[in-house]
Amino acid sequence: MAFEDRLHASLGLYMQAPEWVRALGGRVYRAVPQRVRLGARHGSFLSDAQAQPQDIRWEHIAARLEASLHAAAAVPAHADQARHLLNLRSDPLQRLRELPLMSKAAIKADLSAHLHPHFDAAQRLPMFTGGSTAEPMSFYLHRHVSRSKESAYLRHIEHSLLGASPSDWALSLRGRTVARAGAPGERLWATEPIKRHLLFSSDHLEPRFMPAYVKALERLRPPLIHAFPSALYPLARWLDRNPAPAWTDHVKGVLLTSENVYDFQMALLRRVFPRARIVTHYGHSERVLMAVATGAEARAEFFPLYGLPELVDAQGRVIDEPGVLGEIVGTSFDNHVMPFLRYRTGDMGVWAEAPQYGGATKGTTRFVMQRIEGRCQEFVVCADHRLVSITTLGAAHFHELSQVDRIQFEQQRPGRVTLKVVTAHGLSAADKLRMAAAVRDKTQGGCEVDVQEVAVIERTAHGKQRMLIQHLDLDHYLGAAITPEREDALIVRHEALAA
């Protein structure tokens, strides 16, 4: 087993060890040669991640895709169709699109049928994904390859996009539980020296713990932040009211992962961390696709040599034109133990106006999305059966939001949404009416809104906050979904009529 895999296998025991043991482990880890620590292919994966768009040609991508098709030809679930496609001389993208979509349900029904028979158990890395998805499942990564690849791309993001140096420590707010945190005389954080992470408890984000949080952060001054947006937001709200420039002005990079980032959250983070580069990361446990969004825009740029993205409609037909909402489908590169071909991620997105990576563009293959709209279940259903993304509702701007610690939407029937609000100061009846009106306007009058004050909004077992609890089956509605472009056009038309 490679050093990196042994590290992951023993990480639970490592984090339970005394801090001096963890510190020693960190020094030993950094003394091990990088090729041993991170895998033999880490260097080539890092070069792929660092490749400039103008230097990436379609031929580079086609070679990775061809290798995935060859691996799939040996996998029982794909064998008959993939073998036939290998005999064709057409472009690999055209051949790929002749394959059916691959679903979580099919993998769960027969996992062994999706495994390459020529790789033994020692080359398979068993994994499990649950998270916020409705369909948890087991799957396999390519040992010594998949994690090394992901690590290389994340290092590129940290160093090239966030300006991090190898010696920098990062505040980590990603759902980790810190043993004994909150007990009298105990710290709210622990160190993880191997990754240089300061693991702050995500279970103690209430105002009464914030002074202790900030005091520790002012002393430690980590220049980087890795966080779920919903975990960083309450800390940022506290800092907005109780500035701590000794730390916040020192932060140079923020990496937001695993959740949608809403406009009101991003606006606050930019205000609280004025000198930080903020990057939103898109990826998943299956390591099929990876994308980042940087700058003021929410455009998500996929790494072309990591995996191939597609968009499909509710009937599984390919969407190549911009501005049309569809489900993100991905084909993995390099994981030949269990190739993911045309894998339905359950996430929704909209292509940007122009294809990116001109040299890498084949036909209408695209690598930039105007916005990733979240998972299929993260849409509300209007009375007229339109779908509106929870990202769109999160962009509803109203003054009362400055009083709110957390929000969550819930829907039981079309055309009506409950907005749950946690606030320390309470909302007046007028506040609730204005909030309801703001959200209703964002749906173009499609949803009536009930605002409810609640004491707490529970997180998932992984420390994430679900922004929407959706009880409706959306399969019947996807064909009528509203896109950001369509919504903007409706807003312009509405404002013109009002004027």
Image (spheres, grey):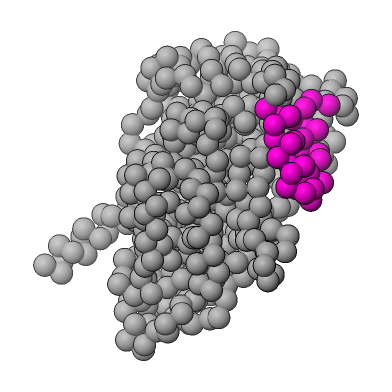
Q: Quadrant of the N terminus?
A: top right
Q: Would residue 90 be counted in the magenta stretch?
A: no
The quarter of the picture where residue 86 lies is: top right
- What secondary structure is the stretch in magenta mostly built from? helix
Q: Point out residue 232 in the picture as x, y percentages from the top left corner.
A: 50, 57
Q: In the figure, 201 relative to 75: above or below? A: below
Q: Point out residue 407 in the picture as x, y percentages from the top left corner.
A: 48, 70
Q: Would residue 3 be counted in the magenta stretch?
A: yes
Residue at 63% from the left image edge and 27% from the top image edge: 149
Lateral position of residue 119 relative to residue 132, left or right: right
Q: In the figure, 331 relative to 477: above or below? A: above
Q: How many marks?
A: 0
Q: Of 436 and 346, which appears nearest the observer?
A: 436
Q: Quadrant of the C terminus?
A: bottom left
Whether residue 117 appears in this view of the structure is no
Residue at 60% from the left image edge and 48% from the top image edge: 198
The quarter of the picture where residue 368 lies is: top left
- Where does the magenta region start and end? 1-30
Q: In the figure, 54 relative to 174: above or below? A: above
